[in-house]
Each structure stands twice: as structure tokens, then as C-alpha cells.
Image (cartoon, grey):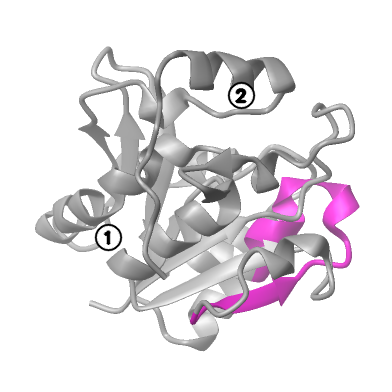
Amino acid sequence: MRRAVLLPAAGASSRMRGRDKLLEDVGGQPCLRHLAQAALASADSVFVALPALAHPRAEALAGLALTLVPVPDAATGMSAALKAGAVAARAVQAEALMVLPADMPDLAPHLAPLWDAFEAFPEGQILRAFTDGGQAGHPVIFPAACLRAFATLTGDSGAAPVLRQFEAALVAHKLPDASPTRDLDTPQDWAQWRASGARPAPSAD
């Protein structure tokens, strides 16, 4: 199966009081690079959606064998990055696309097992990660048949409309921790995460 991963990284990081959450340090490198390396280790193609190819976040990805996808209309909401990523995945004939939020560093060690679980399901299923307590989270892996529906997304609702459209195909995969719901949006989130003792090991380039 040809696997693809999309990291939507075109947002403004508006709740970080002037800092960029995707450039926060995780294991000695920017968070975005940390997740991109994990994605590359688990998939055939990795796409990172950025507001522009010259955005400072692109520097954090230097030297990695991935594809940067410009999203000039990123200000319209998360939908713009998802639509651009779906187009890129279809262009390489990906058989499935994982949407991996770029501000959730704890997901990195779970990507390969999630792909393995997805490939064990019947064709056409959507895999969504859940916490052990049953709370829906991220990432989500969509089969290729769902990707055309991304073109209908608008605003900042993420892929929720696609998930509702294909609700019958959704299967839950529980992870043994809170990583599916632990996104780091604010300086307080990052401070609490670091205080919790989260210390991912540096990834090798």
C-alpha cells in the first residue's frame, strides 16, 4: 500500500503570544521536524502544508525528503491545507492519507502501528485514533476513496464533514495514552507538557 502523510502546518499559531508552536523544541529540534521525521519513517510520501514555500517553518524541514505544499489561502481556515494535501496525495496515487496535526509531538511513536492497524482493516475503512478512555482524537487515516470529498471542505472545521459523510466506514483504534487529544496550542500547554516530564529522544536525520 502506498502510504501518504499530511502535516497541516499552515496555521498562524495565533494563541502563542508571538511564538510559533511548530518551532518549539521537542527533543532538541523543532516540533514540526520531529513529527515530519516520524512521518517519513512510516510512509512513502510526506506532505507539509505551509502558508508559503519561503515561510520560516520551511527552514525547520531542510534536508528532509518530503514535499512542501503552499497554501496561499491558509487564512480561510484548516480546510485550505486539507484540500491542498488531498490533491497532493492523489497526485502521487496514494492509497491512503494520514492527517497528522503538527502540534501533537506525542503522536510520533504511534504512526507505524496505526498504519499497520489500518492495513489490517477491510478496504474502505477510515481509522481514527482514540484515547484509551474512548475520546476521539488524531491522527486519522483516510482511504483514497474519501479524498475527493476534501474538495468540499470550508472554513476551520477540519475534516469533520468528511468524517460525518463516511461515518459508517469509521473504525476506532485506541492508543494507550492521551496522545490522540494532547495538542499544544498555547505557551501554557507547552509549559505543562514539559513539566509533565515529556522528553522525546532526538530523532536522527
Q: Secondary structure at mark 2?
A: helix
Residue 186's image quarter? top right
Identify the residue shown where x is 84% and y is 74%.
54
Name the residue type under label 1: Gly
Q: Is residue 6 left or right of residue 174?
A: right
Could you tell me if residue 97 is visible in this image? no
Could you tell me if residue 120 is visible in this image? yes
Q: Which mark is residue 190?
A: 2
Identify the residue shown where x is 14% and y is 58%.
122
Q: Is residue 16 above or below residue 146?
A: above
195 within the magenta span = no
Which region shows up in magenta? 65-84
Q: Is residue 38 left or right of residue 105?
A: left
Name the quarter where the C terminus is drawn: bottom left
Q: Is residue 49 above or below residue 102?
A: below
Residues under labels 2 and 1: Cα distance?
Answer: 36 Å
Residue 134's image quarter? top left
